[in-house]
Amino acid sequence: MSKLQQDFLFDGRYRLRKKLGEGGFSEVWLVDDTSAKITLVLKVFLPSAQLDESGIEMFRQEFALVYDLNHPNLLKYTYYGVCVGHPYLVMPYYNSGSAEDLLGNCSERKAWHFLHDVAAGLACMHEHQPPIIHQDIKPANVLLDGNSYIITDFGISGKARNILGEGGEGQSTVQGTRPYMPPEKFRRDQIPLVASDIWALGASLYELITGRLPFGGKGGEAQMQGAEMPAMPASISDDMKQIILQCLSMEPTDRPTATDLERFAAMRIGQDTFTSGSIHA
């Protein structure tokens, strides 16, 4: 397959309009579906070499796993395919941007809705058997849809990423975006934990409200090195401060679950004032 570029007709059906993003192993494009005559988003996985049948089967299994997730706060992948050894996913297009557009200009009421919706989506993932861990929660991976927030960019496990060349056989591949990675991600022999998504959610909340990351570009590594939580604006309610602090706990077992957060946020949405409290109360 030739290098992806604008106007290229991918897999004989998807006309590439605009590149929306790229990473070490994939590109995301806005496309026109020439058959259905609609606008969609295409995510193409681009390993350095074509995958063999076992690698392609791994992606089929992963798509089947996330396809069964039906939740209003999770992006629904609509199709999986393989073109010349390159797996790809097709998904709906949301034209309202992402939560990243709200950084530093997010009211607390919006922050509660963000917390509720993202926690609800994560609860669906984390309660799945086996649990599905996002591993890259951040504002840019939460899409806006009216007054709702939708988690995107999930569903590819560490095993599949190893197939794509991001880690050797038997290696533990560290996934995520550094400023949103919790302390345990920087420990030797780290393994994915559902609680790691909660730390990233706390960092995202802090950034949405303040416009700054709690530990700068170093993420949880700075916390491991003794960095303390920076002071939060006085305008933030005690409830929100408490939630952010609990989500950013050093130890994974000290963090609330996604279900805890969803329920607590639901209690606060619609209230005119917020009083101090704990989600563990």
Image (cartoon, helix red, strand yellow):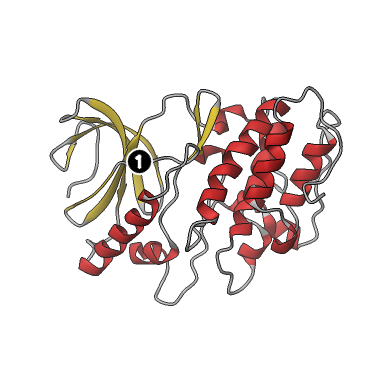
Answer with left or right where residue 123 lies relative to residue 93: right
Query: Where is residue 141 drawn, in percent x and y?
Result: 50, 41
Answer with left or right where residue 133 lies relative to residue 41: right
The residue shown at (69%, 62%) is 252
Q: Residue furthest left?
A: 12
Query: What amino acid type is highlighted by mark number 1?
Result: Val
Instruction: Write down the quadrant of residue 156 in the picture.
Output: bottom left
Q: Is residue 186 above or below residue 127?
A: below
Query: Where is residue 99 drawn, in percent x and y?
Result: 56, 32
- Is 116 or 192 nearer to us in this picture? 116
The residue shown at (51%, 52%) is 125
- How busy is the neighbourhood of tag 1: few (under 14 within 10 Å), some, or many (20 plus)? many
- Is 9 or 241 nearer to us in this picture? 241
Q: Residue furthest bottom?
A: 170
- Is 15 or 196 nearer to us in this picture? 196
The residue shown at (46%, 74%) is 171
Find numbered disc 1 in the image and state the secondary structure of the residue it sits on. strand
Residue 120 visible in the displayed image? yes
Q: Find disc 1 in the rendering and name its residue.
A: 28
Q: How many marks?
A: 1
Query: Where is residue 256 drawn, in percent x and y?
Result: 71, 53
- Is 11 or 58 nearer to us in this picture? 58
Residue 212 visible in the displayed image? no
Instruction: Write down the quadrant of residue 13 in the picture.
Output: top left
Query: Where is residue 106 drawn, in percent x and y?
Result: 67, 27
